[in-house]
Image (cartoon, helix red, strand yellow):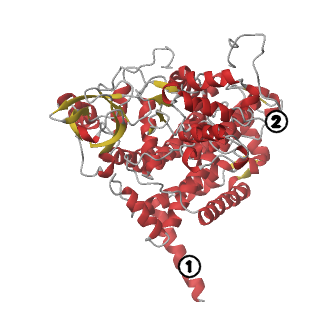
Amino acid sequence: MRLIQTVRLIQKVGAWVDERLQLATPMRETLQHPVPRQTASWAYVFGSAALTVLALQVVTGILLALIYVPSAGEAWSSLQVLNHQVTLGWFIRALHGWGSNFMVAIVLVHMAEVFLFGAYKFPRELTWVVGVLLLLMTLGMAFTGQVLRFDQDAYWGLGIGASISSRVPILGPFIVKLLLGGPIIAGATLSRFFALHVFVIPGSLLAFVGLHLLMVLKLGINEWPMPGRIVRRATYLREYHELTRKDGIPFWPDAAGKDLLFSGFILLCIAVCAMHFGPFGPGGQPDPTIIQTAPQPDYFFLWLYALLSLLPPSMETPALLIGPAIALVVLLTLPFYSGEGEKHWKRRPIAVLTILLVAVALGTLTHLASNAPWSPVMDAWSGQPIPAQYLKGRTALQRQGALVFQAKQCHNCHALDGVGGQRGPQLDRIAVELTQDQLIRQVIQGGGNMPAYGKNLSPAETTALVAFLETLHPNGQDVARDDESRTAQTPARP
Amino acid sequence: MSLREGLSRRGALMKLGLLFNGAMGTVLAVPIVSYVLSPLLRERKTGYDSWLNLGALDQFPVGQTRLAVYRNPVVNPTDGETANIPCWVRNLDNEKFQVFAINCAHLGCPVRWFPQSGLFLCPCHGGAYYADGSRASGPPERGLFEYRYKVQQGNLLIEAGEMLTTGAPTAGLTNIDTGRPPCA
């Protein structure tokens, strides 16, 4: 009996509140709006998952702000406090960090899916444009968030941001100072990124998410594309309404089940990752005088890190300054030059190829960046000895050459038996590829991508080093020799 | 008072109100924009750079390249350690010096000096520079940025205060890669 009374009381209070708010009816109507039957699909769950992760980010972000201190002198220690002293502080940090990773991934998948399903076409052009802006804000949140984890990577990452901005013609130095909030990366920089990460970007993000959702409701969710079902401005709206009337189901409760399940699954994944892998950093202290560091961006910017080391130097600045602008214009204008026509991916081979190309390119660059073969291994010369088999049975001169190889940091860029840097070529069979004269020339004059060592090697050191290099060939394979009939003018290998 | 008169008075009041708010908005925009642009405006007034003492000359032996640290001249109380900026000092002959920015001319990562091979190496994308700061190999398009320096009463002074990047007023232009082959 008491239960029934309680329920009645709650209903009464609810009715009293709604009499004043008058929100129940419009909310019910919104939730029950008809959607095409086939959109209740596992392919349509990414938008709602992104919304769920956004909610998680807002909540965990506020929780972190209870402890975090946005001061260049104290941010790092406040992160240590979160990790080690505050009860479950590490877990909240881990949730926020993994939430950010999942967010970027889900938003990208959502975008690819919307593109492949032709959902950006008439009349959902503005929904797409707002979506592109939301992608930019998501990446903005990811980058500013990485800065708030104020460690060595954040500090030097800001330096990279400043270096890139400084290349803008004429305005460069001004942009750098506005970005850093002063002449150097310091307290004002962190405060500025804190304001961006906590107020400016989330504020606009939430407003734009509101617009995005409003348009999804007003214009209806994109119908499942069918080959041959052509979008025409004159007839589309009538056809869509007919589809939802004849073959529609209410979004709530019929179509929302998969959204809910998937959102829950994503939350579970984030929680499991957070528990298993823990929070991200912070890495070393943000002290610029500790220069023994090799900064790396977080995973969603690794492709950029790779691109910046693989592009020819002369193309870098144009690619950095013009590339993003072109990409942005292409994305923003996409629904205007392709607003009608086929939606189905089977009839849009260029769209499918574009997605594949972008995915393969991003994947490859990210993979390359995760082992960064272009970075010298800065401590290989002192920390990674030459494998023993390269020293056994060698003459004194050759062993002296191996010493030179280590002492002159050759090992930082050249690997032996898979150990050492990969900046330059692996040298295990260099004696087969270059003759003695070519080796000497390469060492002394450099070339290709190698510095010249002429000034820093005595003749004795060069002789020893080349003697060692000449031992580097597979067993039984002969070393390269000059053709006896020619003089030593053999051109060096390019 | 007729209805029409009342309407027109209300209309006038609304226009006046809009105008007043617009004027106030414009007046407030001046301090707001100046506040936002303060990192730029400050420089025009007082400048960021000043001459800083890196220490006595005997800390920098002839023929060697040593790491030096200075405290940035423009400091806020919240800067902590970030205001301590390192740089590389090369003493050529006790009269001529070179003071290099720590930042790689490519993307600003901290370069490390390897005296054995006489190279500055960047850990990020593998930029390499010779002892004189000129580009040796890798993605940088130019040599290391240099600070202006002077020797005063046995001390080495540099003009600093601003992160050295392309286009910064104190970024030395002496090391721009001219396309000539590197010193062999």
Coordinates of residue B127 in the picture (x, y in percent): 51, 31
Seen at 61% across and 33% down, the residue is: A464
Splitting the image into 4 quarters, where does residue B173 fall? top left
Q: Is residue A294 above or below residue B140?
A: below
Q: Amino acid at mark 1?
A: Arg
Checking the image for residue A226, the label placed there is 2
Can residue A448 be seen from the camera position used here?
Answer: no
Q: Which residue is mark 1?
A: A8
Seen at 50% across and 25% down, the residue is: B136
Which of the pair B102/A200 is nearer the observer?
A: B102
Can residue A154 be seen from the camera position used here?
Answer: yes
Chain hosting mark 2: A
Chain hosting mark 1: A
C-alpha separation, residue under disc 1 versus residue under disc 2: 49 Å
Coordinates of residue A132 in the picture (x, y in percent): 57, 36
Coordinates of residue A178 in the picture (x, y in percent): 34, 35
Q: Residues within 10 Å of mark 1 (few under 14, many from 20)?
A: few
Asked which secondary structure carries label 2, the reply is loop
Splitting the image into 4 quarters, where does residue B115 fall? top left
Coordinates of residue A348 in the picture (x, y in percent): 78, 28
Q: Residues within 10 Å of mark 2 (few under 14, many from 20)?
A: some
Q: Residue furthest bottom?
A: A1
Q: Amino acid at mark 2?
A: Met
Asked which secondary structure carries label 1, the reply is helix
Which of the pair A131/A389 is nearer the observer?
A: A389
